[in-house]
Image: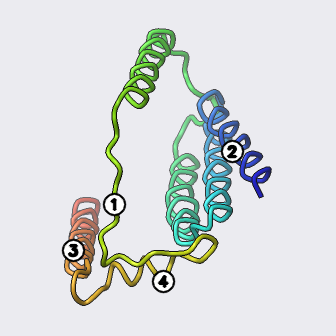
Amino acid sequence: MAWLFWLLAVVSVGAAVAVVLNRDIFRAALFLVLCFFTIAIIYVTLNADFLAAVQVLIYIGAISVLLIFAILLTRGVQRGNPFNRLKFPALLITGLMLVVLILVLTWTDWPSIVAPAHIGQVAVGEPTTAAIGATLFDKVQGFILPFEIAAMLLLAAIIGAIVLVREK
């Protein structure tokens, strides 16, 4: 199973690099879908079935389709991306930020995280969906109220977007 993980990791990184380097924006969006899909399969190899399902439903099913529709409905997509004078300064700043990030990650003394006692532990190789659901919707220390508040905020945002976009 380890070889499958590393193969998918290489394909995922290759697809991500292709997204950045591809001049055709439609093909870049298709490489983004490939990257999302390989990450979902990586989640499956790590026994994170809930994250794999969320990856497929949200990122591949919603965000990627939205991006592809936006690209198809945009004028001038056939011309490709224009050249940018700031490509090399952006590459330099990105490289410096990567070095700083690596240094911070390696030099920081990270404290260990201890799981609270009320959170159910999952054995290696077992599905995680039931444990996540039990933790979210526990009657004593669950997160049902924040979950419902987030749902209401999303509903308000959708209604606000519809009001802003509708024709007068």
Residue at the spot of label 3 = 146
Q: Amino acid at mark 4?
A: Ala
In the displayed structure, would residue 141 be above or below residue 96? below
Around disc 2, counting alpha carbons within 10 Å, would you say few (fewer than 14), some (14 to 19), or many (20 or more)?
some
Q: Give the secondary structure at mark 1.
A: loop
| Label 3–label 2 contact, CB within 8 A | no
N-terminal of the two: label 2 or label 1?
2
Which one is closest to the eye, mark 4 or mark 3? 4
Q: Indicate the quadrant containing the C terminus: top left, top right, bottom left or bottom right.
A: bottom left
Disc 3 or 1, which lies upstream in sequence? 1
Residue at image x 21%, y 65%? 160
Question: Which badge, 3 or 2, comes first in the chain's sequence?
Answer: 2
Residue 85 % position (x, y): 48, 9
Q: CA distance from mark 1 to mark 4?
A: 21 Å
Helix, strand or loop status at disc 4: helix
| Percent x, y of residue 164 | 23, 60
Q: Quadrant of residue 52?
A: bottom right
Look at discs 2 and 4 and give the one toward the viewer: 4
Q: Amino acid at mark 3?
A: Pro
**Disc 4 target residue:** 130
Query: Neighbour class for label 1 at 10 Å: few (<14), some, many (≥20)?
Result: few
Q: Disc 2 or disc 1, which is closer to the eye?
A: 1
Marks 2 and 1 sit apart, C-alpha to C-alpha, by: 29 Å
Lateral position of residue 38 relative to residue 49, left or right? right
Circle 4 packing at 10 Å, graded few (<14), some (14-19), many (20+), is few
Describe residue 137's horizontal placement relative to residue 75 as left or right. Answer: left
Q: CA distance from mark 3 to mark 1?
A: 23 Å
Disc 1 target residue: 114
- Assess whether mark 4 and mark 2 are in contact (beta carbons under 8 angstroms): no
In this view of the protein, which residue sits in the foreground, 60 or 145? 145
Task: Of the two numbered discs 1 and 4 on the same chain, state the one appearing first in sequence.
Answer: 1
Q: Which residue is mark 2?
A: 9
